[in-house]
Structure formats: structure tokens, C-alpha cells
Amino acid sequence: MTIEHSVITDTAQGKLILGIESSCDETAASVVRGGTEILSSIIHSQAEEHAQFGGVVPEIAGRSHLREVHRVIREALREAKVSPAELAGVAVTVRPGLIGSLLVGLSAAKGFALRHRLPLIPVHHIHAHVWAATMELTTEAFPAIALVVSGGHTALYRAESPREFTPLAQTLDDAAGEAFDKVAWILGLAYPGGPSISKLAEEGDPSAFRFPRYRPKALPNSKELGLERPLGFSFSGLKTSVLYHVRGQDALADTPAPSDIPRRADVAASFQEAVVDALVNQAVEAASREGLDRIFVAGGVACNKRLREKMTAAAIAAGKTAIFPSPAYCSDNAAMIAGLGWPLYEAGATSDLTLDASPR
Ligand code: KG4
Ligand code: ZN
């Protein structure tokens, strides 16, 4: 009993957490000290395996995680020069994501935790993306507005603390990253679509074509009721608008792109501008309504240069600050999982081996 206690105290003092991420198409493991000091971050991307399909195929994702997860964990420990005995706990993404993929990471985490007698720390993937934006801050991070923009999510939250999130708005249909991926397919660009579109957009004119920027409609009697216009996002109309622009009114999105698309860079830049404007508009509006000064922008789409520029400028104009993770920690990674794992561990939010995963 005495020995057990001293082991736990020692490892907690070291503040070392192993993080495991497998919710979508990246198999990742990382060791982070005290929530913010990244000692290693190993990512195996499956992008090439999914490229020919223009999006993530769940069956392929699950099998690929299974092949890679143990190697990735070993490498994360080796690079961090940390032995399992020095760890305080194992943080693992348990939601949301592809269930088959989540279960591979969770099973690996359970095996590791059982073997090395470590507590499991269940991590919410979205909260971890936001944690990534706070990791380099020296000032108090919360409360803040959090805009999470990835391949699976586009949502605004009021974040009170690393684990208390109140949803303010989300997309009615496609996520912003999904829109980038689908429009890349329409334009015959490589998957994942975000990086391909933003690269091509640098050669294009963002004002060449005026694609729609969705804004939720005010309720019919909102004035009398004193209600504000709802916050929200929608990208499916924008995607269709690009499709019709490029291929004509009767076009279908799932057929391969024609080899010659006139002014493709202008289309890419104009599409990107429409997504960015919608995101910036709603995030700054949310911060004003909630009376908050900080806007965290996280998730794969937060890599987008144009979004970073326009959000930063709009936030400053409104007397606020937009805060992004460094580009390496915007897309899926395990440093954000191991990082958030530490405050969760400190708060006692650990779990035993009965821990389960959930797609939602
Ligand atoms: O966060 P993430 O790695 O995975 C999910 O949790 O979904 O986000 C992946 C998404 C993809 O849709 C990808 O196209 C998009 O992020 N993305 C970008 C950029 N880099 C990645 N979107 C716009 N611009 C980028 N530079
Ligand atoms: Zn993600």
C-alpha cells in the first residue's frame, strides 16, 4: 500500500501523460508534461489510403489504425525518452469520431493501462482541439469563445473551462472541412481538400466570383419578442453553388472533375473566401454577444492561412483576440489529447477499464 502510494505521488509530480488519438484518419500518440510541454508527437496519417475516395472510408481507417497504433505509441515514448513507469496516466480520445477507429485507440490504451497499472483519462476530441489553442498561452485562457472547424465538426461554443462547453451554434449540414474536401473533388484537386484549395487559392482572386455566405434567418416575430438572430453555419448550398458554377445546373457532385476547369484558381479562392467570411462573421458575433474577449479557433481548418488572417483582423477590429494553435497542432494529433489529459487527471476525471467509446 505504501509503495503504491509513493509510486502514484512520484508519477503525478512528473506530470507526464501519454495521449492516444484514433478518432478519424490519423493514428497518433504523444507524451506531454503538465498539459503544455510537448515531449513527442507522432502522427501516422492515412490520407494516402483515402485519397482515391475523396474522403475517409471508415473500414479502411479502422484497419489502418490497428496496423499502426502500437508502433506509434512505442515511438512516442522513445522520442520523449519516457518509460511507462514514469507516466501518471493514459489519455485517450473516446468521442466523437468513427466508432471502429475510436475502439482501436481505446483498446490499445486499455491494454497499456492494464499492463502498466495506470489510470485511463477519457478525452473529448473537440475539447482537445480547443486545448491545443491554449497550450502556448501564458495568460488565463478561459472563459472564451471556441470555434471548432474540422472535417467532422463546425461549431461555436462558450468554453467556461477546459471541460465545460456550452454549444452556441453548429452547422446545419456539412462541416467546413468537409466542404473543402467536397469542393476539392469538384475541382479535381487532391484529398484532403483544405490544403489543396488553400494552395491553389493563393494564385486566384478571392473576389472573382460571389458565392453565397449563409447567415441564419431571424425568426418572423423576433423583434417583438426581443430575440437576436440565431447563430449558425451551412455549407451545403455553397458547395452546390460551386458545383453548378463549374459544371452547369444539372451536374452531379460524385462524377470525376472535367480535366479543364476555366479559372480554377479564382473559383478556389472565391470559395475559400465565402467559407472564411461565414466563419469569421459568426465567431466575432458570438464573442460580442457573450461579452468575451478571446476567440479560440481550432481543428484542421484552423490551419487555413486566409482564415487566420481574416479572423485575426476582424477580432482586433472588434476589440478582441483570435487565438490559433500552431499549424502543426490544428489537425488531428495526440499532443492535444495528452495535453488536456493533465488538467483532467488533476481534476480526478479518470476512469477504469470499463471505459467505453461513443461516435457522438
Ligand atoms: O481536425 P482534422 O484533422 O480532423 C477532423 O477531426 O475532422 O480536420 C481535417 C479537415 C479536413 O477536412 C481538411 O480538408 C481540413 O481539415 N483542412 C483544411 C486545411 N488543412 C486541413 N481546411 C482548410 N484549409 C487548410 N489549410
Ligand atoms: Zn479533429
Image (tube, rainbow, N blue to C red):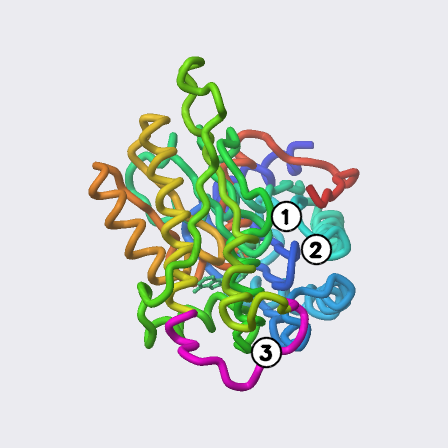
Query: Residue 215: percent from the left, percent from the top?
Result: 44, 41
Neighbours of disc 1 within 10 Å: few (<14), some (14-19), many (20+): many
The residue type indicated by label 2 comes to Gly
> Pointer 1 and pointer 3: residues touching (CB < 8 Å)?
no
Name the residue tied to disc 1. 93
Kindly check if marks 3 and 2 are in contact, taking CB atoms under 8 A apart as contact: no
Q: Disc 3 or 2, which lies upstream in sequence?
A: 2
Q: Is 266 inside the magenta-drawn segment? A: yes
Q: Quadrant of the C terminus?
A: top right
- Residue visible at 59% across and 78% down? 257
Q: CA distance from mark 1 to mark 3?
A: 36 Å
Magenta extent: 252-267
Disc 1 is placed on an element classified as strand
- Locate residue 287: give its quadrant: top left
Precedes in sequence: disc 1 or disc 3: 1
What is the x, y in percent for residue 285? 35, 35
Neighbour class for label 2 at 10 Å: few (<14), some, many (≥20)? many
Q: Disc 2 vs disc 1: Cβ atoms closer than 8 Å?
A: yes
Alpha carbon distance from label 2 to label 1:
7 Å
What secondary structure is the stretch in magenta mostly built from? loop
Query: Which residue is labeled 2 in the image?
Result: 105
Along the line of sight, the residue nearer the viewer: 300 or 103: 300
Task: State the residue lying farthest toward the bottom.
Answer: 259
Asked if residue 294 lies left or right of residue 331, the reply is: left
Residue 304 image point, x, y percent: 40, 61
Whether residue 111 is situated above or below residue 251 in the rendered picture: above
Q: Which of label 3 and label 2 is nearer to you? A: 3
User: Residue 257's mark?
Assistant: 3
